[in-house]
Image (cartoon, grey):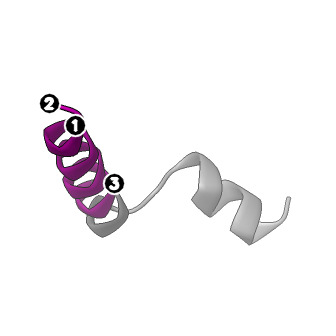
Amino acid sequence: MNRSYKYRLYPSEKDKQELEKHLKYAAGRNE
């Protein structure tokens, strides 16, 4: 099994935080 595929399935904590920030920012712009 290839490592990069595994990382895509299980993003790191930092990646999750970046994604949440992006989603909150996008949601704020939509209001």
Q: Is residue 9 above or below residue 27?
A: below
Q: Nearer the viewer, mark 2 or mark 3?
A: 2
Main SS, magenta region, reads helix
Residue 29 falls in image quadrant: top left
Q: CA distance from mark 1 to mark 3?
A: 12 Å
Q: Residue furthest right?
A: 1
Residue 7 location, x and y as percent? 60, 61
**Quadrant of the snapshot with the C terminus:** top left
| Mark 1 vs 3, N-terminal side | 3
Residue 15 location, x and y as percent? 36, 64
Classify 10 Å Cα crowding around label 1: few (below 14), some (14-19), many (20 and above).
few
| Mark 2 vs 3, N-terminal side | 3
Q: Is residue 2 magenta?
A: no
Q: Are marks 2 and 1 in contact (CB under 8 Å)?
A: yes
Q: Residue furthest top?
A: 31
The residue identified by callout 2 is 31
The residue identified by callout 1 is 27
Q: Which amino acid is tagged 3?
A: Leu
Q: Are marks 1 and 3 in contact (CB under 8 Å)?
A: no
What residue lies at 33% left-to-right and 54% top-to-bottom? 19
Q: CA distance from mark 2 to mark 3?
A: 19 Å
Q: Nearer the viewer, mark 2 or mark 1?
A: 2
What residue lies at 74% left-to-right and 59% top-to-bottom? 5
Residue 8 location, x and y as percent? 62, 56
What residue lies at 72% left-to-right and 69% top-to-bottom? 4
The residue identified by callout 3 is 19
